[in-house]
Amino acid sequence: MINAIAIDDEPLALKVVENFCEKVDFITLQKTFNKPTEALKHLDKFPIDLLFLDINMPSINGIEFYKKLNQNAMVIFTTAYSEYAVEGFNLNAIDYILKPFTLERFVLAANKARDFFNYQNQKENTSPYLYVRADYSLIKVNISDILYVEGLDDYLKIHIQNQKTIVTRLTMKGILEKLPAKDFVRVHRSFIIPLNRIESVRNKNVYVAGKEIPVGTSYEEAFFKQVKG
């Protein structure tokens, strides 16, 4: 069960969130606040999993409010102003829904929060999927669909079977921590591959999904040991 609170200076907007939460069986809306200062006091004593947070409030901007938090709570921004979307997603928001929103749109955002909550609370590398941020969205990627990962400076290209390639701001080390070590191996400073996708190995090149990928000298010993194993 996901424990949540809602913060909005408009009582009617809070009522909408409250009514919609009652229709979702995995979220408990513990309290609502129309004064952000009171919400901050509450959060100092009672940590929660999820915030439904308005942005354009008179006393404090919702984005600034979220930056002040001393806990790692998920956030779904609920606002009438689309111009804050980019900054919201830069703060790793689960979703950003524009008022007035429908129950269907609310449930979509809630489902994203549930999936991410379950993902965070599973043991490391046991989940069949991972989450990455791209195109101002939180994208769910099935690990079994990954063809290979390609490093590009501060970005990665995740090549996926029968899907558009995802470009995300993540390091090679960062994504390796998200992937199951027994199934993936780094073969080059710029490439990570799933072992079950290897089509052939020739000299110091490995072929995955029809692509020739070089095996770097510093990764060669570990790679061939894992392949033989």
Image (tube, rainbow, N blue to C red):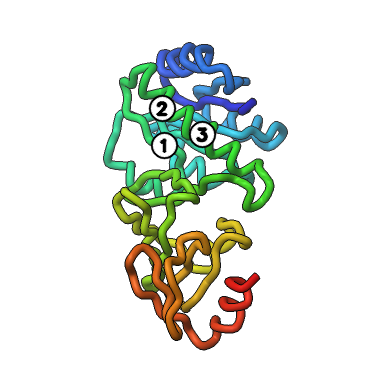
Hey, which quadrant is residue 4 in on the image? top right
Precedes in sequence: disc 2 or disc 3 = 2
Amino acid found under the numbered disc labelled 1: Asp
Across and down, in percent, residue 174 comes to: 54, 63
Contact, mark 1 vs mark 2 (Cβ under 8 Å)? yes
Amino acid found under the numbered disc labelled 2: Leu
182 with respect to 86 (left or right): right
The structure residue drawn at horizontal position 57% and vertical position 17%, both measured from the top left corner, is: 25
Residue to which mark 3 is pinned: 113
**What element does badge 3 sit on?**
helix
**What element does badge 1 sit on?**
strand
Residue to which mark 2 is pinned: 108
Precedes in sequence: disc 1 or disc 2 = 1
| Relative height, residue 228 to residue 136 (above, below) | below
| Relative height, residue 219 to residue 6 (above, below) | below
Contact, mark 2 vs mark 3 (Cβ under 8 Å)? no
Precedes in sequence: disc 3 or disc 1 = 1
Contact, mark 3 vs mark 1 (Cβ under 8 Å)? yes
**What element does badge 2 sit on?**
helix
Residue to which mark 1 is pinned: 95
Hey, which quadrant is residue 219 in on the image? bottom right
Quarter of the image for the N terminus: give it: top right
52 with respect to 4 (left or right): left
Cα separation between marks 1 and 2: 9 Å
Q: Residue furthest right?
A: 45
The structure residue drawn at horizontal position 65% and vertical position 41%, both measured from the top left corner, is: 121
